[in-house]
Image: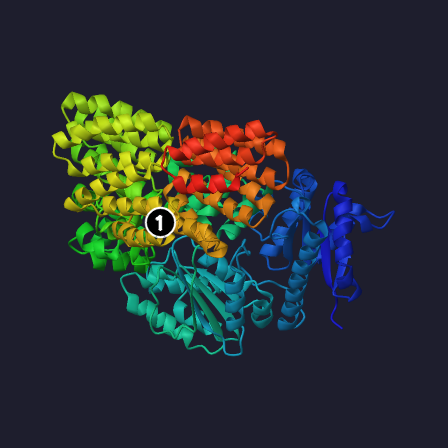
Amino acid sequence: MAKPVRLFISSVAEDAASRAELEAHLKPLARQRLIEVWHEGKVDPGGQPAAQVHAQLEAAELVVLLVTPAFIASDRHMHEEAARALARRTAGEVDVVPVLVRDCAWDWTEFGKLAPLPKEGPIGGAPDRDRAWTEVARGLRRVVDGVMARRAAAGGQRSLAAGLPPEERCIGRDAVVDSLAAALSRDRPGRALLLGAAGIGKSTVSLAVLHRPEVVARFGERRFFVRLDAAPDAASAAAALADALRVAPGPDLRQRALSSLTAGPAILALDNLETPWNGDDQAETEALLAELAAMPQLALVASVRGAGRPGRVAWSSPVELWPLGHAEAEAMFCAIAGEEHRGKPALSALLSLQEGVPLAIDLLAHSAQGNDLVNLKEEWEARRTAVLEREGGARDRLRSWNASLELSIGSPRMTSEARRLLAVLAVLPDGVAQRDLAAVFPDAGPAAARVLAHMRLAYFEGGRLKMLSPVREYVKAAHPPAAEDLGQAMDHYGELARTFGPVPGTPGGTEATARLAPEAANLDAVIRRGLAEAAAGRWIEAAVALTHFARFSGHSAPMPLGRALEVAQRAGDERRAALCTQSLGDIALSRSQHNEARARYQEALPLHRLVGDVLGEASCIKGLGDIALARSQHDEARARYQEALPLHRLVGDVLGEASCIKGLGDIALARSQHDEARARYQEALPLYRQVGSVLGEASCIRSLGDIALARSQHDEARTRYQQALPLYRQVGSVPGEANCIRSLGDIALACTQHNEARARYQEALPLYRQVGDVLGEASCIRSLGDIALARSQHDEARARYQEALPLYRQVGDVLGEANCIRSLGDIAQAHSDAGAARARYEEALALYQRIPEPFSIGWTHRRLAAIAPDSAIRRRHIEATRSAWHSIARNDLIAGLDQDFRS
């Protein structure tokens, strides 16, 4: 049986309890004679403790450092035990594993580059301490297996490969490392190629592979890591190889180095191979690779920045590394900066800006040590990628993000056109669509894009050429585009805004929205740059042109209207300031932000009057009417529409005229005056068709459906909604589409087709949320409550009404608020709680009367009659019901009332 591995635990006296926990979890390995554990608690009494510790440390094959604040504060343990263990590790004599017991700045120490256990952070912060210790035990078992494998490979003598750099943290790459280690450890070793962008972790993965137990067992000391980032040609690469192999300088250095590799199985990692391969004599570098690949016992792994694959080698395992996911990025950050940051919103915000690039995350985490994340976020906003640099690392690609990127930007493979496109691409957060390349960069767009993608300074995704955020931020600051190139790009996106921005809500609106939506961040960035120019007028107009896109698509990307307004005001441009202000009101109104919308219209109105813009004046007045209508303030709404109507007619604005007439119809419909409402819609409909307003036509048709639904003419209502729905979709009006779908749900509900009704409401609800239509959202939720109420699911119904009620109040919809309250009364009545029901009905009645809304007033009085405590009160409510319905000519309802209350 093989001798057990001698395991030395270095710990301070204060951590004796933690040391005992570790020893307990390692007991199964000790019983199997796989390890022999020693620590200061085993010092022989009467002996010399210091001498015993020194002897055991020198004999150890595996040293475990129990890392706590007390440990790193102990001069003896740090300057004697840890320092000696690391010195022996550098000499290839021992493995050293830090075990993180309590949170501390251990990564500031000499062993801060080693891969710790457990991977997820200190044991003291783990939710399950035993689980964390078990992970440590399993990790140490893998190291023990590696020690025994090296013994076997070296004839029983322990050693690490001389000069091999230590293993670094490798988080989120386990599957890649496992796959590569398996391929490279076969009897016929593989030829693996690691590709990827700057800072993506190629060197880290290569080292992790070289330290895997199966690789150690296969190759023992003959594991070599060759850094080539300072080797500009094949001769320099051969010299670096010879140095890693410990071949003495002299004649025939290259051949002697290659000969030393043929002495037995070996594994060779060529790091940053792109440096000599991209040099002046690429063929000679490939010839060197071919000689290496021809060695049957040599496993070869090479890393290359970019996507290029050096020739003359049949690469068996080309692997491209991509950014880390959020969980892996957070684990990596917390392993360096401390577990106290995990799960914090500020951390998520910071990590999202690094887009999973390991080097950026590593450097950011070092900046977070002893820092506050909010402060770090503010520093990022001020300095951007300048934050991603460790002290003294300005020229070290592993300690400076900027230095790392400059190696790629300065590559001989980069053409002048590629550098120009790189600079333009950095100012476009959404990247460039393939179809826009010729317009944005007309002279050599596709060729330059190919070079950037080859170098992995950019990448193609979904038909777009994009840059990772840390790359973009550095290039934007360090390599601004030439004025001519920037102007070409800005002209293109400005024209996109002016051409497609006004189209949503008109025929072709769906296609226009599809064209603009992927460019939203680009449009914002370009227009903001344009607004900083001396002649900013056309960029103010470009911002205004995006109003319909924001209104009808519900796109939540930032729009530059607010900034455009500031620029217009500063320039004293009242006309454009009025347009910006009115547009902000239009967007606020579409998102049920009524107070803001009112303020914007009231601010724009005198400006329009000042510059004599009658159409703008009329539009603002109508907008104020729309707000009043949405808040059930019908008298004010009517007054506003009647004020705006002659102004629209004065300037020949048929569309505005039709909209005012339809608004008057909406008031009549809200008050159940169906004949008047129908007349208004039928008056407006031909005007909308006259000017080709498909949106207005669809709205009139849908409103005629609303009248039919209110009168229980379900077939006609369904036909109207199905006629309007494709028109809304044609113009890209998400709110109109949602309204039709919800109304189809209302028909299904009225016909007790509850499953279909629920499906319709659930289809409409996310559309309302997409465009920020709080009123529509509230109505869907209330209708889902109506379904639950109809099915006697009273708890669910109550929850829905209570969810919808504050939304109605938020937008000032008195009718919706009253409907919710009345329905809560219906629930109370269903539970035979007449007192609670009466209170709810009377509360709702007061709201209906405020509007007033005769249809609902009548139904509420009817409910109160049914639960009236005496006949006199009942008669009073019956008469009030009859009066309300008589005012809207609902004789059918009155007949039903008389039948139900015959006595």
Residue at 49% x, 56% y: name it. Answer: 755
Q: How many marks?
A: 1
Q: Which amino acid type is marked by label 1?
A: Cys
Residue at 17% x, 27% y: name it. Answer: 575
Given residues 753 and 407, the one toward you in this image is: 753
Which secondary structure lies at badge 1?
helix
Given residues 459 and 552, the one toward you in this image is: 552
- Mark 1 nearby-residue class (10 Å; few <14, some 14–19, many ≥20): many
Residue bearing the label numbered 1:
740
Which quarter of the rendering shows the C terminus?
top right
Residue 443: give x, y in percent of width and height.
Answer: 15, 54
Q: Judge left or right: residue 494 versus residue 45.
A: left
Residue 574: give x, y in percent of width and height.
Answer: 18, 24
Residue 893: give x, y in percent of width and height.
Answer: 43, 41
Q: Judge left or right: residue 842 versus residue 46.
A: left
Would you say residue 370 is visible in this rendering? Answer: no
- Name above or below for residue 882 compared with residue 430: above
Residue 547: give x, y in percent of width and height.
Answer: 26, 38
- Name above or below for residue 454 compared with residue 392: below
Of all residues shown, which one is farthest toward the right?
A: 46
